[in-house]
Image (cartoon, grey):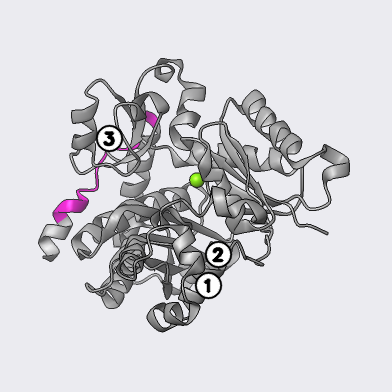
Amino acid sequence: MQRVIFLVDMNAFFISCEMTRNQDLVGRPAAVAGDPKKRTGIILAANYEAREYGVKTAMVLHEAKKLCPDMVLVPPDHGFYESMSKRVMTILNRYTPIIEQNSIDEAWLDMTGCESLFGKPSKAAQGIMDSIRGELGLWCSIGISENRFLAKMASEMKKPLGITELWREEIQYKLWPLPVSSMYGIGRQTAVKLKGLGIETIGDLAVFNRQTLEEKLGKYGVQLSNLANGLDDSQVIPHNRGEMKSIGRSTTLPEDITDIEQAKRVLMLLCEEIGAEARKYGKKGRTVQLTIKYGNFQSITRQTTFKPTYLTREIYGAGLKLLEKNWDANKPVRLLGVSLSGFFSDCEMDQISLFNCGGGERGSEKEERLERAMDAIRRKHGYRTVGRAALMSYKRER
Ligand SMILES: [Mg+2]
């Protein structure tokens, strides 16, 4: 049976979530931005009105403000976006149980054999889009194909509110003319390498000598050649959504970076959000994992274990050690991710505190009070009203 795979991608997700609860943002340029008070903040998501001025995701705040001075900025509220994301997934779950979430705002669906239930793929997709729009007030684009790669590429072709089919027999005229840099799985560095071989479009890549690709890029080169030819037999793997096993955050960087100081700032933001969520749910974890994805899409994950904590400073400290140990200034980084896992049960927690009543404990109790106070103020007055002076501590370390 022909496989049928959808990729449902939410349009301008964070800011669209905000627009559902704040009518003032509707019909005027607005964006969710990392830290509106600091020039170092970046645009996390701009609505379509702001995009008309050239504002883009990951743009530095002061550049975006130059393009669109009247843009309204909203601080991020990840808890809210997570809850909206769950509601989107609940709607998707009515169509198929085989859902693989790729990020907070997109997921693959295996819709193979669903035609008798929901009609042709395009009709099923329209149903999904209408449900999400009608019930949540959010927009999405949907790509339809026979595998994950082509579905993902299709979802990018028409935004917002696009439904695009891209079957293998159509790739020569729908996929091949696109620049190779727009291909899912190709980072900026790889695009440069491929250009060096004279490969400009996905079509160039598809017909390029595979052996040369393998020599230049190893197995990854062969994989890219397959993808460019529309071949991808990877499965949609559903996640089980059981008890909270880890709290993680990751972000694709505005540009591939080689400067560790930049990476540290991003790491701090991620750790602050993880810490706040961990404290909210009372989850102390003993494992911090760092993911670094490079410009060539290869990635490494490294982890470390310590005394269970939900303190931002300790999570960041562990993440920082991993970052410094594994930083290679010659390898541009595209994405950073951090997670906290290995949560202790309350019972285990009691045992730990029984054995751990030495001098160090009082300091961290005080710190916990401080971080919790910050959480409370942020809940009341917005996320970034209380700063951790993250940048100050970098300066000290340097
Ligand atoms: Mg997306």
Say few, some or many: other residues with alpha carbon within 10 Å of mark 2 (under 14 / 14 to 19 / 20 or more).
many
Q: What percent of the width, then of the height, locates residue 349?
A: 52, 65
Which quadrant of the structure image shows residue 127? Answer: top right
Say few, some or many: other residues with alpha carbon within 10 Å of mark 1 (under 14 / 14 to 19 / 20 or more).
some
Q: Is residue 389 magenta?
A: yes
130 vs 165, nearest the viewer = 165
- The amino acid sitting under disc 3 is Thr
Q: How far apart, in angstroms, are the residues tagged by discs 1 and 3?
A: 46 Å
Dot in front, 1 or 3? 1
Residue depicted at 69% across the width and 58% down the height: 238
Residue depicted at 22% across the width and 29% down the height: 67
CB within 8 Å, label 1 to label 3? no
Which structural element holds mark 1?
helix
Which structural element holds mark 3?
loop
Which residue bears the numbered disc 2?
A: 227
CB within 8 Å, label 2 to label 1? yes
Q: In the drawing, does residue 397 fall left or right of residue 145?
A: left
Q: What percent of the width, then of the height, locates residue 89?
A: 65, 43
Which residue bears the numbered disc 1?
A: 223
Q: How far apart, in angstroms, are the residues tagged by discs 2 and 1?
A: 6 Å
Which residue bears the numbered disc 3?
A: 385
Which quadrant of the structure image shows residue 309? Answer: bottom left
- Mark 1 residue CB less than 8 A from any atom of ligand 1: no
Q: In the drawing, does residue 1 fall left or right of residue 74?
A: right
Name the quarter where the N terminus is drawn.
bottom right
Q: How far apart, in angstroms, are the residues tagged by discs 2 and 3?
A: 46 Å
Residue depicted at 28% across the width and 54% down the height: 255
Q: Is residue 102 visible?
A: no
Q: Which residues are drawn in magenta?
A: 380-392
280 vs 45, nearest the viewer = 45
